[in-house]
Image: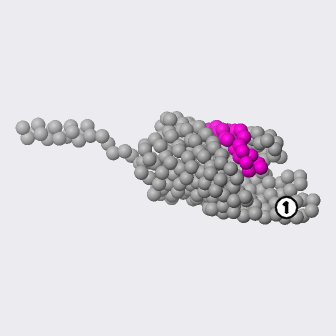
Amino acid sequence: MRYGMIAALLLGVAAAPALAEERDFCPERPGLDTPPCIVDKGRLQAELGLADWTLDRQPDSRTDEIDAGQIQLRYGVTDSTELRFGWTAYGHVRVRDRATGAVDRMSGTGDVTLGVKQSLLDPGGDKLSIALLPTVSLPSGGQAIGAGDWGASLALPASYPLSDIFQLELTPEVDAAVDADRSGRHLAYSVAGGLGAKLSKAWSVTGELQTSHDDDPSGHRSEHRAAFSAAYQFGKDFQIDAAAIAGLDHQTPDVEAYFGISHRF
């Protein structure tokens, strides 16, 4: 009888569901693509852009934009769903007229963005992973870097591991983008794709390309970019990153460089 009870106890332990394993740390910084992975249920992840500089040289002007405090908070509400909040604390734009040398400067905060990322396949991002990401932006920012009206976007981020080292990434997106005159919306769309490499437990790098098209009433434009980014992970829950983006045509800003940190609580 005693042995029967022991055997039943062992069988019960073996049949009990295993505790859910913590997912690998998966920040959305850096890069042009958006990973489809979902933050663990009940965990908060903070991603902070410390500094971001963009240079756009046109025949009649030069524009420098510096942003700081680009905050994104991600919270896992279920095993396959996360809620998102984004905001830029400070932006400074300097525009110099090439003909006259006159300089205009503007500073202010950015708009608030709210979103939900819903996993459609493999929320951990270990195999073929796909997610749906609708986002809405609220016109809370100033004239410097705020859009002036509400906007919305829908992205379908996806990833696929080729091996223990390499991973393919793809992010198509369609936007209801705010018009250049800061009132009303128009169609814009883009697709980014890249190849990521996990060089070690700490180091990862990614190369990406992006093409986008914007149907603003003031003039349609297409842009093309190439990006290289690197990240270093300390332990399981903290990462630092840096990225450089180059414009591949005259309509795209010449260069963008930024760095930041991510932490999972």
Q: Is residue 179 highlighted in magenta?
A: yes
Q: Label 1 amino acid?
A: Arg
Location of residue 50 (image quadrant): bottom right
Q: Is residue 231 visible?
A: no
In the figure, 116 relative to 48: above or below?
A: above
Q: Nearer the viewer, residue 138 or 239?
A: 138
Q: Quadrant of the N terminus?
A: top left
Q: Is residue 131 highlighted in magenta?
A: no
In the figure, 106 relative to 125: above or below?
A: below
**What colour scheme was applied to this rendering of the protein?**
one colour
Task: Residue under label 1, please give it.
Answer: 96
Instruction: Give the image location of residue 20, x and y in percent.
Output: 37, 45
Location of residue 192 (image quadrant): top right
In this view, which residue lies farthest toward the front?
A: 183
- Label 1 residue SS: strand
Q: Would you say the magenta stretch is mainly helix, strand or loop?
A: strand
Residue 209 shown left or right of residue 197 in the figure: right
Residue 134 shown left or right of residue 144 in the figure: left
Instruction: Give the image location of residue 94, x and y in percent.
Output: 79, 62
Please tell me which residue is depicted at 14% across the width and 41% down the height of the picture: 6
Q: Quadrant of the C terminus?
A: bottom left
Please tell me which residue is depicted at 52% across the width and 56% down the height of the picture: 46
Q: Nearer the viewer, residue 47 or 18?
A: 47
Residue 160 shown left or right of residue 186 in the figure: left
Please tell me which residue is depicted at 74% across the width and 56% down the height of the picture: 54
Q: Is residue 160 visible?
A: yes
Please tell me which residue is depicted at 50% across the width and 39% down the height of the picture: 119
Instruction: Give the image location of residue 204, x and y in percent.
Output: 58, 50
Crowdedness of circle 1 by 10 Å Cα count: few (<14), some, many (20+)? some
In this view, which residue lies farthest toward the left?
A: 1
Magenta span: 168-195
Instruction: Give the image location of residue 184, x and y in percent.
Output: 72, 45
